[in-house]
Each structure stands twice: as C-alpha cells, then as structure tokens.
Image: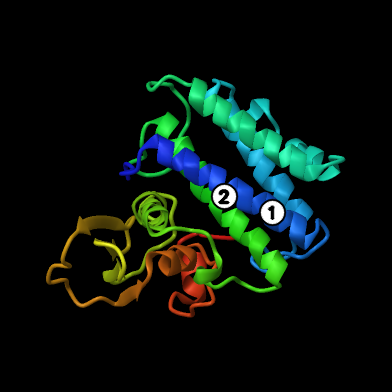
Amino acid sequence: MPTQLPLAQHLEGLRAAMVAFVRYADRAGLAAPVPTCPGWTVRDLVAHQAMVHRWAAGLLRGERPLDRDADALEAEGRAAEDPLEWLRDGAIELVEAIAGAPDDVRAPVYLHDAPRPREFWARRQCHETTMHAVDALSAVFGRRPDPAETWIGTELATDGIDEMLGGFVTRPVSRLRCDEDAVLVVAPDDAPDWWLVRIGPRPAVTERGTGPVPQLPPADWELTGTAVELYLALWNRSVRPDLGPGWSERAAVTWS
C-alpha cells in the first residue's frame, strides 16, 4: 500500500532505529541471546540486518539479487572484527543508495500495491531496522520489551501497521486464509486510522480509513490499543496474546 509518509521521514526513522540498534546491541553484548529471535545471538542479529542493508542497496544500484550472496554476506558480518561497525557501514551504504537513486529507479519490490522502488526500500528498511532494533532491546532485557520502553512514535508505528496490513498479508503468497469469510479490524486508540482486513479462501483484502470508524461488520478478530502496541503485536514482538500462534503461522510473519 503506498506510503503516506515522505521519504525523508522514513530515512529519519531508519537513522533513529540504527542509533537504538547499535546502542542496545553494544549494551547486550554480541554473545547475548535474542528472546524475540529464537536461536539467534546479537551477533547473528547484527550480521543479518547488515546483510539486508547491503542487499537492498545493491538492488537500488541495479545489481541482480544473486550478485550478492546473502549467506556469504551474513557470514562476513558474523566474522567481522567489529560487527557493529560493519552494521553501521551497511546502513551508510543503504542510505547512499537511496539518496543516489532517481525517483523512477527500476528495482525489485515484493509487497502488494507497493510504493515506487526508492520509497519502497526506504520504508521497508525503516521498519525492518526498527523491528530488529527492538530485537536488540529484547536482548538487553532478556524479554520482549513493553511498548513504552521503546523509542517508537505513533506516526511511524501507524505507517508500519499500514505496511503490514496493506502490503504483506494481501500478497498472493500470504497464507492468511480461512475457508469461511472472516474480518480483522485494527484500530489504534491514539491515531485516527483504522484497517479492515477481509480474510477468506483467497488473498486478504485490506481497506484503510481515517477518521471515525464507520459501522463495521461484526469483527471476528478486533485489535485495539496504542499504535505502537499494535505495531509490535503484528510483528510478533509483543507480549500481547490477542493474535495467538495462528497469526505468525498464517500471515507468514516471523522474527527473521
């Protein structure tokens, strides 16, 4: 779903997430386990995110996806003498690629109804880096963080909810399906936006609205709370039980 935030705001969100990521990864230590990423250490988390930044930068420069092997890049990051420096360098490479790309750059995107590639990758890496910075924070605490313990603002969280519900779960490859038609309503109580997701045997269809919530059909699944609470919950970084295990399995939303 096309973003309503300007590119500059996504780049600022990426910058804030990187500051948090490096701070919390350093505080937790590279050997610390990451509660929100079962089986990973902070070193694994850092290497993964740094790989994705480099991979996305390559796509914006016109490189083919296979030109930079993801596994080899992650291995390079894990073996780096200073993995956090390697992470920072990857983020710089990404921002330079976004800044240097023309508005009409041709590059792969993979979400439904995605923005143009330059905006897409700024938005996607803003939210991916934010979630992985939350993972680093979970390594500091040894548990999933409370929304109030994060740095995330309402506007960014609302955009992240929109990307998830409009872009991810509506893809043809999404497994968020059910035999009988069902409805998911997501309505932050601190933002004017709401989403209605119609789920059935075919790919989900999402409607977004702003302002008073209209008379909606009975929701089989209704989520309310602050935008940050819902953002974290939809990405399985929350302690909230509302979504249950079926969400991560059927929406194909995992910690990696």
The amino acid pointed to by label 2 is Ala
236 over 83 or under it: above or below = below
Could you say which disc has been placed on residue 23 in the image? 1
Q: Which residue is mark 2?
A: 17
Crowding near pointer 2: few (<14 within 10 Å), some, many (20+)? Answer: many
Image quadrant in which the C terminus is located: bottom right
Q: Secondary structure at mark 1?
A: helix
Could you say which disc has been placed on residue 13 in the image? none
- Image position, residue 117 (x, y; %): 42, 31
Q: Which residue appears at 83% of the width and 42% of the height?
A: 82
Q: Which residue appears at 56% of the width and 69% of the height?
A: 149
Q: Nearer the viewer, residue 49 or 200?
A: 49
Residue 65 visible? The answer is: no
Would residue 214 appear left or right of 79 to someone viewing this image? left
Q: Are marks 1 and 2 in contact (CB under 8 Å)?
A: no
Would residue 151 appear left or right of 204 to someone viewing this image? right
Task: Tell me where residue 84 sits by quadrant.
Answer: top right
Q: Secondary structure at mark 2?
A: helix
Residue 162 visible? The answer is: yes
Image quadrant in which the N terminus is located: top left
> Which colour style is shown?
rainbow
Q: Which residue appears at 68% of the width and 29% of the height?
A: 68
Calculate the distance from the C-alpha at mark 1 to the C-alpha at mark 2: 10 Å
- Image position, residue 160 (x, y; %): 42, 54
Q: Residue furthest bottom?
A: 241
- Image position, residue 95 (x, y; %): 56, 31
Q: Which residue appears at 44% of the width and 69% of the height?
A: 229
Q: Which sits earlier in the primary sequence, circle 1 or circle 2?
A: 2
244 over 187 or under it: above or below = below
The amino acid pointed to by label 1 is Arg
Would residue 242 appear left or right of 36 to someone viewing this image? left
Task: Tell me where residue 183 sits by quadrant.
Answer: bottom left
